Image: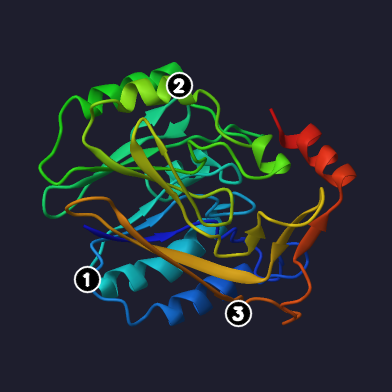
Amino acid sequence: MRILHLTDTHLYGDPAARHYDRIDTAAALRGLLERLESLRGIDVVVHTGDASEDGTSGSYRLLHEILDPFAAALGAPLVVVMGNHDVSAVYGADIAPGQRLVERQDRVEELPGGGRVVVLDTSVPGAGYGHLEPEQLAWLGDVLEHPVPGGTVLAMHHPPLVAATALLRALDLDGLAELEAVLEGSDVQIVLSGHYHHAMTGAIGGIPVQVAPGVTNVVDPLAEGAHEQSLALSGASVVELGEGAPRVISAVHPNRGDVLGDLDAPVYRFTPEQVAQIVAAAGR
């Protein structure tokens, strides 16, 4: 299985809106896809959440207006996960109704060749951190009791990994031990996530975890001091599954939605005081 992994497009229903007053997120996505037009042999396109910034029907229609023909040209189905900026009820009612558990979008997408993508909605309304309800874990366990010939890819917005920065650690996923217990012994080959906006790898219960860089901006997890910053870049990953360990290829490019066009100017650079304010508003 060969997967194009996209994440964190943060689209708006209002075409004049700019992310951090700087990034035209639709232009960023279109520009990145132009760079990926030569890809071949992709079996599925997975978008791991924060598809929208404002949670509007218009933003989701725009997402599919851009991504549906791109995925169709690859001959690959498109799977979209909900993130903390998304509104699951809006997406489920207007765009892609699926199995609903505690107002979330959890579902199974069957793939050609006998594989599947299992989608978990880790979003918490009004918050930035991630959470899985016991009902969701029970549902996941029931799904994974029945392995499939092509194996399972688990897609969820919040990575089941400890974050690299103080801000992201306050906005990460809880209940990792409970999730690990469900995944143990299953046919899950890899967990795909977004949220952190930078490439990262790890594992949960011996299962590889891959975080793709963001489309709308890319976080610098090694910024100096206690500051947190993001750069005007757009990224994507290709994940190849087969014999042995997964092979992950990630790339970042200048953001084609950047209205300043200045790669040396961070999209944002938060002071420790600003980080504390964000954590108080959206953290656990």
Contact, mark 3 vs mark 2 (Cβ under 8 Å): no
Q: Quadrant of the N terminus?
A: bottom left
Q: Amino acid at mark 3?
A: Arg
Q: Nearer the viewer, residue 12 or 149?
A: 149
Expressed as whole percent of the image width and height from the top left, the position of residue 148 reads: 13, 38
Query: Contact, CB < 8 Å: mark 3 with mark 1?
Result: no
Q: Nearer the viewer, residue 114 or 103?
A: 114
219 on left or right of 30: right
- Residues packed near mark 2 inside 10 Å, few (<14), some (14 to 19) or many (20 plus): few
* Alpha carbons under labels 3 and 1: distance apart: 25 Å
Residue 237 in percent (x, y) is at: 42, 63
Mark 3 to mark 2 CA distance (whole Å): 40 Å
**123 in relation to 64, above or below:** above
Horizontal side of residue 8 vs 75, given as left or right: right
For this orientation, the residue located farthest to the right is 273
Residue at label 1?
Answer: 41
**Rendering coords of residue 119 (x, y %):** 36, 40
Q: Which residue is mark 3?
A: 256
Label 3: how many Cα within 10 Å (few below 14, some 14–19, many 20+): many
Image coords of residue 188 (percent x, y):
26, 38
Q: Earlier in the sequence, mark 3 or mark 2?
A: 2
**Viewer-proximal residue, 181 or 121?**
181
Corner quadrant of residue 44: bottom left
In the picture, measured across the screen, residue 249 lies left or right of residue 29, that is left
Question: Could one spot residue 254 in this view of the protein?
Answer: yes
Mark 3 vs mark 1, foreground winner is 1
Secondary element type, mark 1: loop
Q: Residue at x 89, y 43 (%)?
A: 273
Disc 3, SS: loop
The amino acid pointed to by label 1 is Gly
Q: Residue at x 15, y 33 (%)?
A: 147
Q: Which residue is mark 2?
A: 177
